[in-house]
Image (cartoon, rainbow, N blue to C red):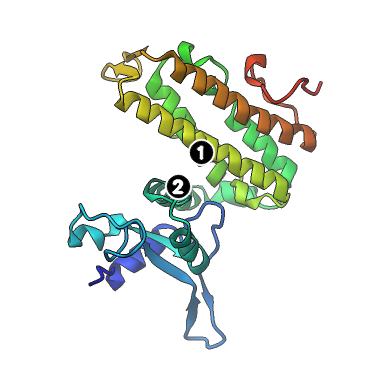
Amino acid sequence: MRDDFNIKIKEILARRVGMQCSNPNCRKLTCGPRDTPTKAVNIGVAAHITAASARGPRYDKTISSRERKSIENGIWLCQNCAKLIDSDMERYPIGVLREWKHLSEEAARLEVEGTVATKRSEGLSDVDLIKFYAQCFDRPAFQDPFRQEGSMEAFDKAIEDTIVALNTGCLRARDGAILSHSKGKVYLSNVEWRQKMDVIVDMLRAIRSRYKLAVKQSEIQVGGSDSRNSWYFIRDARVAHWMDQTRGELMGVFAEICQEAGVRVPTFPHRFLSRLETQPE
C-alpha cells in the first residue's frame, strides 16, 4: 500500500518553491496556461524523498506511514527530474534531495523578498555571472588553511552560504542581510562553465559532508555556546589536509573559468591553486 500525499500537501510543496522544479540544475517552471482560458497545464510532481511503498526508491522502513506521506518527505520536481532521481538512486540519495528542497525554497523566498534586485539582474551576461560568483569566494573560508580557521561553525556556515549563492544568485552576510543579487549557475549559457560550476558545488557539498562526519566521529572536537566563544581541536591531521586539498581543487576549477572569461581570479592563496601554474595579471 502506497503512502501518497494528499492534494493540500502537493499544492503547498509546489507553492513553496514558486512552482519551479527543485533541482537546482533545472529550476524549470512547472505550470502555465493552456489554450482553454479556464485551464492550466502542470508538469510538476510531488515526489517522495523516501519511497511511498516498500519496493520504491530510497525506502526507509524506520519511519511511520504518517511521516512517509508528510510534507517533510516531499519535494516538488518536474516530471523529468522526478524520473531522474528514481533512476539513479546512488547519485541522488536522500541527503541530496533534502538539500535541493532547502535550496529551492530559499531561492523562492529570496525572489519574493528581493523583487527589485531580481529585476536588476535581468539581462546579465555569462561574464557578469562569473564576476558575481567570484564575490562569493571572497571570504576566509577560501583563504585560510583549515587549521587556522577562527571558528568551525563560521567555516561550515560560509560553505553553506556559498552553495546557496551559487545556486540561487543571492549572496548573504552572516546576519542574513543581502550583500549582492544576481542569478544562479543554471542561467549560464556556456555549457562548459555551467558543468564546471556544477562540479564546484558538488565539491562544496562534499566539504560540508566531510566536516559533519569528522565532528560526528570526533576527528574534530567543537565546543562553546556560539561562534564567538567556540573552540575546536583537530584530532586527525588527515581531515585538515583533505579540506585544504579539496578547496584547492575547486578553487583551481573556478580560476580556470575566470581565465577563460577574462575575469580577475579571486585572491586565492598560492598553496590552494593546485591546478594552475600561473594566474592572470
Rendered position, 216 above or below 165: above
Is residue 82 in sight in this rendering? yes
Tell me if 274 is positioned left or right of 98 in this view. Answer: right
Residue on which disc 2 sits:
103
Q: Residue at x 27, y 16 (%)?
A: 224
Amino acid under disc 2: Leu
**Residue underneath mark 1:** 163
Question: For the view shown, which residue lies furthest in the bottom direction?
Answer: 36
Question: For the residue labelled by badge 1, is the local secondary structure a helix, a strand or a loop?
Answer: helix
Name which residue lies at 57% across and 46% down. Answer: 117
Residue 109 coordinates in the image, percent (x, y): 44, 50
- The three-letter amino acid code for the residue at tag 1 is Ile
- How many angstroms separate mark 1 from mark 2 (CA)? 9 Å
Residue placed at 80% from the left, 23% from the top?
Answer: 280
Residue 54, horizontal then vertical, whole percent: 27, 64
Disc 1: CA contacts within 10 A as few (<14), some (14-19) or many (>=20): many
Q: For this view, does 51 lie left or right of residue 14?
A: left
Rendered-image quadrant of the C terminus: top right
Outermost residue toward the front?
A: 55
Query: In the rendered view, would you say 6 is above or below 255?
Result: below
> Which residue appears at 65% of the width and 46% of the height?
195
The percent position of residue 40, horizontal first and vertical second, equals: 49, 80
- Residue 100 point in image, percent of width and height: 44, 50
Q: Which type of secondary structure does the marked residue at label 2 adopt?
A: helix
Front one among 138 and 62: 62
In the rendered structure, find residue 20 and report the number of the disc placed on it. none
Question: Dot 2, how many residues are within 10 Å of its Cα: few (below 14), some (14-19), or many (20+)?
Answer: many
Determine contact: label 1, label 2, CB under 8 Å.
yes
Label 1 vs 2, first from the N-terminus = 2
Which of these two is toward me, 197 or 29? 197
Residue 174, visible in the rendered structure: no
